[in-house]
Image: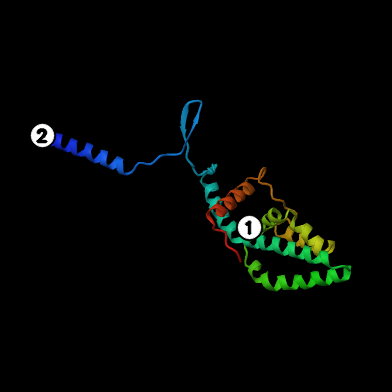
Amino acid sequence: MRVSLIIFCFLIFSLISFSQENITISPFIVIDGETIFTAKIPQLDIIEFKDNNERRNFYKLKRRVLKVYPYALETKLKVDSLNHALDSIGKKRKKRRYTRSVTKIVKAQYSTALKNLSMKEGKILIKLIYRETGISTYDLLRQYKGWWSATIWQTFAKMYDHNLKTIYDPVNVREDMFIDKILLQAKKEGRLKSL
């Protein structure tokens, strides 16, 4: 009995001394005489999967999106710089010549890396290019290379079950919604790699 009383007194004493040393005041607001404590709670995005197969496909998609996204960003930068340069060039012939020279440079720089992409990564890249530029890959080709070249590439893509006219629609397409969640999460975590 005496031992338990000593332990009890020791616990009370340690709690009193501990609470006096570590007093923290939480931020609060008073509304109509009521005190409401406030705190910053990080936002959690919860993704509900239909089954384990969809969960597995999500993680494959995540790996593919993080691999391909830097190419989409680079495409956006190249398109913006090309548009800016073409605005300063006056004659149509000089614009065509400049576009061809940029095409050669880009082809030499990225052709080997893009050839090593899988079929699914290519489809994701087409969607991400639309997401970043707001223009489909077909329309980009048509704008810079002409109608004939865009049609040839679209036909070639169709042979491999691709579509260069694919748009990015995260509201109606579940895969695009997953891509959006992946990119938002990666931006929060700072995990997006540049080329």
Please, which residue is most extreme toward the left here?
Answer: 2
Where disc 1 sits, the SS reads helix
Q: Nearer the viewer, mark 1 or mark 2?
A: 2
Compared with 186, 113 (above or below) is below
The image position of residue 123, as x and y in percent, is 67, 57
- 159 to the left or right of 70: right
Please, which residue is most extreme toward the top here?
Answer: 32
Please name whichever residue, 16 or 149, is drawn nearer the observer in this view of the structure. 16
- 75 to the left or right of 4: right
Where disc 2 sits, the SS reads helix
Picture quarter with the N terminus: top left
Name the residue tied to disc 1: 120
Picture quarter with the C terminus: bottom right
Residue 151 seen? no
The image position of residue 187, as x and y in percent, is 57, 54
Query: Label 2 is placed on what type of residue?
Result: Arg
Residue visible at 67% across and 72% down in the picture:
109
The image position of residue 183, as x and y in percent, is 59, 53
Mark 1 crowd level (few <14, some 14–19, many ≥20, 10 Å Cα): few
Q: Which mark is residue 73?
A: none
Question: Of callouts 1 and 2, which one flags the residue occurring earlier in the amino acid sequence?
Answer: 2
